[in-house]
Amino acid sequence: MSVDQVQRNTVIGLAASVLLAGGKFIAGVLGNSSAMVADGVESLADTVGSIVVWQGVRVASRPPDTDHPYGYGKAEAVAAFSVGALLLVAAVVIVAKAFRDMLTPHEAPAAWTLIVLVGVIAAKEVLFRLVLRGATAFESDAARADAWHHRSDAITSAAAFIGVTVAIWGPGLFNAPRLVFADEAAAMIASGIILFTGVRLMRPSLRELLDATAPELAARVRATAAQVEGVRLVEKVLARKSGRGYLIDMHLHVAPDLTVHAAHALSGKVKAFVREQHRNVGHVLIHIEPDERESAAHSQRTES
C-alpha cells in the first residue's frame, strides 16, 4: 500500500466524519439528547484529527533535504500526538456538558435518535477497519491513531445508544424518573473511554519525539552486523524511530591495522547488509574503532 492510498483513506475518513458530526449534532439538538450532542463534539474532534493526520502523512513522505537530512518522518509522531491531545480535549468538553445537563431537569430524548446512532456506529466501524488496514500495511503511527479515533467514536456512539435507550424507556418501565439522566451518564462513560484512547495514542508518539530507544530492533541489528566478515565486535547499538522507519547508530570494532579505505568499505558493507535485512531501517550511522583486545591481552601476558 502506498502513501497515496493512506492519504486517500484519511480523506474518506475526513469526509465521513464531517457528515457524521453534523448529523449527530443536529439529531442531538432536535432529539433532546445530551449524549448525541457530546458524540457530535467527539466527531468534530475526529474531523480535525483526520486533517492533522492527512497533513502529517503528507509531510512525513517528503524525502530528506539539506535542512532535514534525516527526513520528515517525525511529522507523523507530531500528528499522532496532536490527535491524542484532541481526544483529551473532547473528553473534557463532553464531561462538562453532561454534568451541566444533569443539573437541569429535562425530558427524555426522542426515540428516533436511536436509528441515527445505529447508522453512525456501523459507518464508524467500517472506517476504523479501512483506515487501520492501510495504517498497518504502511506502518504509519499517525494513520493508526486516526483509525482508533474512528473506533473511539463508534464506542461513544454505542454508549450513547445504551444511554438514550435507558433514558427513553427506563423511567416508565422501572418507575424511576431519574433514569432520564442515563443519557448524560452514557456521555460521561464515553468520555472516559475517549480519555483512555487519547492517552494510549499519545504514548508511542511521545516516545518517538523524545528519541526513545528501540532495544529489540537494536539487538537484531547488532546480530546482523556481527555476521559481516571483518567486524570483530559490535557495541553501542542505538535504534530510534522516525516516522515509518528507524535511525541506527552503532560502534564497530575492526582490526587495528585496517586502512582508512578498507574501514570505510567495511562500514558501507555493514550499512547495506543491515538495510537489506531490516527493511524498516532507513539511516545507519557507523563509528569505526580499533579492536585493542588482542594487544591488551598480549601486554598482560608480557607483564606477567
Image (cartoon, grey):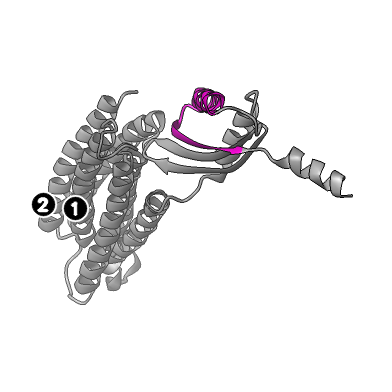
Q: Main secondary structure of the magenta part?
A: helix
Characterize the local packing of mark 2: few (<14), some (14-19) or many (20 or more) Cα atoms within 10 angstroms: some
| Residue displayed at 20% across by 34% down | 11
Q: Is residue 268 magenta?
A: yes
From which residue to which does the magenta span run?
260-289
Which quadrant does the N terminus fall into? Answer: top left
**Residue flagged by tag 2: what amino acid is it?**
Ile
Could you tell me which secondary element the residue under label 2 belongs to?
helix
Task: Please name whichever residue, 220 or 134, is drawn nearer the observer in this view of the structure.
Answer: 220
Residue 293 shows in the view: yes
The CA span between labels 2 and 1 is 8 Å
Horizontal side of residue 302 vs 217, given as left or right: right
Horizontal side of residue 301 vs 71, given as left or right: right
Marks 2,1: beta carbons within 8 A: yes
Q: Which mark is residue 26?
A: 2
Residue 273 coordinates in the image, percent (x, y)? 54, 23
Q: Which mark is residue 40?
A: 1
